[in-house]
Amino acid sequence: SLRPYLKSAKREVPRTIGRPDYADDPNGFPHSEQKLRGSTSIKCLSDEEIEGMRVACKLAREVLDEGVKVSGRMLPSPLYHGFPKSCCTSINEVICHGIPDMRPLQNGDICNIDVTVYHRDFHGDLNETLFIGEVNKTAKTLVKTTWSAFRRQLKLLSQESSTETLVLLFKSMPTLMGFQLCDLTVATASTSCSTQHLLFRIMLKIKLLVL
């Protein structure tokens, strides 16, 4: 069973770095996102906004690769709805959005690291799952199956497939391998709002699949 573990002390981000509205809310509440709830319109991004999204995602990739620190002039944007840490670490049976703590990683763990940065009004959000030492066959199959489903979805996206087609694909592949989906999660998108309810309801995170 899951239990909370000791966490490290909180660190502050310099005030000179741009931040979303929820970073200054005492409860981490995203007021700008709340205004979009219930809307049926879909915003088409301009070329400049698309480039801003690309830059934010590139920076997030560099953070995940330990290439950029706070000097990159960006804010760790998981600090959302009061989330206490600047990234998510989901270990083994934790589906997603796990809170980093001081528990030592052990041989055989699978650990998903989820990084989101906020840079010039855009969020870059991505994650990666790592094998810690030697993991068992089931864990390897779990991660490889999810990765394969993700890659096939990317191919369909390039063909302008419907979101319904993407959902059906992502549900069918894991089932054939003996896994099932967790329906208690919602996707995030790399736009000016951290969670885009209008664009995607497909979770492409490696930790979505559960035994």
Image (cartoon, grey):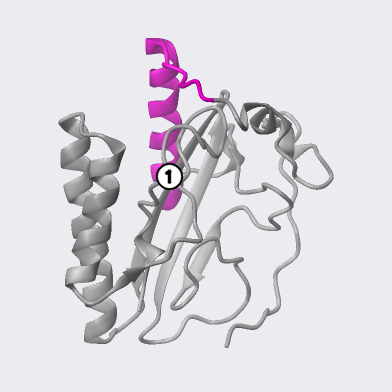
Three-letter amino acid code at the position of disc 1: Arg
Residue situated in front as seen by the camera: 111 or 12: 111
Residue 66 in view, yes or no = no
The residue most toward the right is 26
Magenta segment's dominant SS is helix
Residue at image x 66%, y 57%? 85
Residue at image x 25%, y 51%? 168
Q: Is residue 75 above or below residue 1?
A: above
Q: Is residue 20 above or below residue 80?
A: above
Which quadrant is the N terminus positioned in?
Answer: bottom right
Residue at image x 45%, y 47%? 187
Q: Position of residue 71 (x, y in %)?
A: 58, 37
Q: Position of residue 41 (x, y in %)?
A: 50, 20
Left or right: 61, with 78 as reference point: left
Residue situated in front as seen by the camera: 45 or 131: 45
Q: Quadrant of the rendered structure where residue 156 is?
A: top left
Residue situated in front as seen by the camera: 148 or 37: 37
Which quadrant is the C terminus positioned in?
Answer: bottom left
Q: Does the segment drawn in magenta span residue 106? A: no
Q: Residues within 10 Å of mark 1 (few under 14, many from 20)?
A: some
Residue 148 in view, yes or no = yes
Residue at image x 55%, y 27%? 192
Left or right: 138, with 12 as reference point: left
Q: Position of residue 75 (x, y in %)?
A: 62, 38
Q: What residue sits right under mark 1 in the picture?
A: 201
Q: Position of residue 97 (x, y in %)?
A: 54, 60
Q: Which residues are magenta?
A: 40-64
Q: Does the segment drawn in magenta span residue 52? A: yes
